[in-house]
Image (cartoon, rainbow, N blue to C red):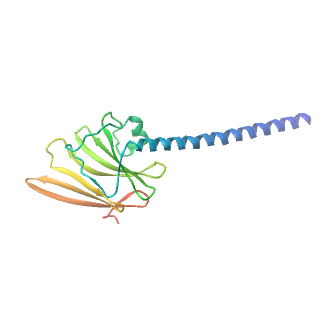
Amino acid sequence: MKYLILFLFSVSLVACSSADDEYYQNQENDNDDDEELSEFDQVLEDFETAELPYESATTYDSYNPSEYLSSEDYQLLQLYMVFSDGYFEDMYSATNKITTDSGIQMITVSAINFDEELSTYLITYDERGWYLSNLRLSFDQDVDDPIQMESKVTKDEVVIKTIVNFAGEQIISEEVYKVNEDGTFTSEQEV
């Protein structure tokens, strides 16, 4: 009987010890999330701050990045959700961090792909730094291409203007996207 009591007592000590270990491990994981989020905020400090309304008309003539995003920044900003080709050196540059009244964080990132196409994207994140959505705001090519895009971002909507120069004529079309409270975008045609 004495050995049974000792056995049960030692089993309960081990059980309590593993529960404490699990508690402290969960606490460490929570602290790791806080560190990651602070890294996210540190990356955003390198972006220039812009106010709404924000206009984007990125062209090769106006594009002059001071530095490119690192592969760590690419991962931390979850840019793989926007640029599915993966990370390539000297391809992605931070352009702006747009201040909003809501908890939604907006940034713009420009990228040059292998076809020498320059695009700027609006990317939204929640207050913790998790990716929500994106829209291509502007577009240009390093050749005499007839297509360009420019846009205007306000608190409530994004207006994207596509300009096509074809056979001496200019054709302009506009797409309007609603900025939803959750940081996603809805085409006005879908509303």
Q: Position of residue 153 (x, y in %)?
A: 31, 57
Rendered residue at 55%/40% (across/down):
32
Quadrant of image for the N terminus: top right
In this orientation, which residue lies closer to the viewer: 84 or 171? 171
Using residue 4 as the reference point, say whether residue 37 is left or right of it.
left
Using residue 140 as the reference point, say whether residue 82 is left or right of it.
right
Q: Residue furthest left?
A: 168
Rendered residue at 15%/42% (across/down):
143
Using residue 144 as the reference point, say whether residue 72 is left or right of it.
right
Rendered residue at 28%/39% (across/down):
65
Rendered residue at 20%/59% (across/down):
173
Q: Residue furthest right?
A: 1
Q: Position of residue 91 (x, y in %)?
A: 30, 37
Q: Position of residue 155 (x, y in %)?
A: 36, 61
Please say if 48 is above or below 91: below
Image quadrant of residue 44? top left
Please say if 49 is above or below 89: below
Quadrant of image for the C terminus: bottom left
Using residue 45 as the reference point, say whether residue 88 is left or right of it.
left
